[in-house]
Image (cartoon, rainbow, N blue to C red):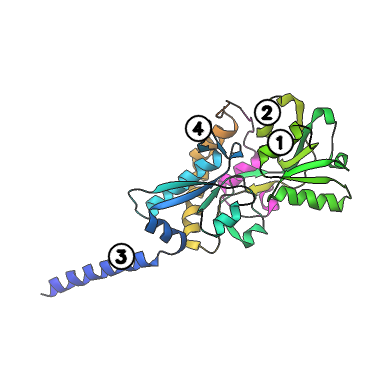
Amino acid sequence: MKRSYMIGFALATALGAGQASAQELTGTLKNIKDTGAITLGHRDSSIPFSYLDDNQKPIGYAMDICYKIVEAVKKELKLDKLEVKLNPVTSSTRIPLLANGTIDLECGSTTNNTERQKQIAYTNTHFLTASRFVSKKSSNIKSIEDLKGKPVVSTSGTTNIKQLTEANAARNLNVNIIPAKDHAEAFLMVETDRAVAFVMDDILLASLVAGSKEPGAYVISTDAFSKPEPYGIMLRKDDPAFKKVVDAATAALYQSPEGAKIYEKWFMQKIPPKGLTLNVPIGPEQKKTFAKPSDSPDPDSYAM
């Protein structure tokens, strides 16, 4: 009788612990478990991070990382199946759609900074970039000072248009700042001479130039509006349980050989749909970031 009692007690304790564990799920993890689905926010033209291929399917470096996170969430929640829903976002809508629960992860080219961290959270940095401008070689614009009094475009809702606005005021440039809805529209304005330059992250400018009708006609500035800045996958703020799973998944990926392979796939090899090669080798700062994953918004923390 005593042995039966002990076995019964052990079973009851185990069941109780299981029930308690299930009840402990909160926030995003609970919602994913309850619905059997996770929603990824994606971009339309942020090559090579998150963009649409010829079949209108979202692909890219950030999408690959997000699918690794999905695998980790599925494993954490012990789910046999996990539906992945895809929701398009823009620079202006990505934070509101994340905050209101429409999307669970934002898989794009989003700069991690202190101001944004007041609203949302980031996982470990997956890329470092700097804010520069692209112009036509025929415009002969060599520096930020050469933009004085001219029409310059940047994408709405980005850190880049904020940096341009701040530089415009600080340097008395008298630039006519034109906001565009997305990167493709902004580059088209330079292509069609409605703006002399487009201010954006240098890697995104490189991808737009590579995919243009005449890549040799454009030049990306040496002058920068910023220090090297970190990109990260966004998730909701004040959700430590979900962030723990996401951080562990990205850290494991970046520290493994697979992290370098995914980087190589999107930055050094031909990418769809046009077979472009960006030819952006992994730099020492990025190698350091992969070796010691961090979600810091401070550009100085990534310096060698």
Q: Looking at the image, which is closer to me, 88 or 122?
A: 88
CA distance separating discs 1 and 3? 54 Å
Q: Is residue 227 left or right of residue 97?
A: right
The local secondary structure at tag 2 comes to loop
Counting residues from the start of the chain, the first of labels 4 and 2 encountered is: 4
Say if residue 295 shows up in the picture. Answer: no
| 79 to 282, vertically: above or below | below
Q: Earlier in the sequence, mark 1 or mark 3?
A: 3
Q: Amino acid at mark 4?
A: Asn
Residue 278 forms part of the magenta stretch: yes
Q: Residue at x 51, y 62 (%)?
A: 239
**Magenta stretch in the rendered image:** 277-304
Circle 1 sits in a helix, a strand or a loop, which is it? helix
Residue under pointer 3: 18
Report if the CB atoms under discs 1 and 3 are less than 8 Å apart.
Answer: no
**What amino acid does circle 1 point to?**
Phe
Q: Which mark is residue 55?
A: 4
Q: Nearer the viewer, mark 3 or mark 2?
A: 2
Q: N-terminal of the two: label 1 or label 4?
A: 4
- Separation of residues labelled 3 and 2 (CA atoms): 56 Å
Marks 1 and 2, how far apart at CA: 9 Å
The residue sitting at 56% across, 55% down in the picture is 97
| Proximity of marks 1 and 2: CB atoms separated by less than 8 Å | yes
Q: Amino acid at mark 3?
A: Gly
Secondary element type, mark 3:
helix
Mark 4 and 3 residues: CB-CB less than 8 Å, in contact? no
Which label sits on residue 187? Answer: 1
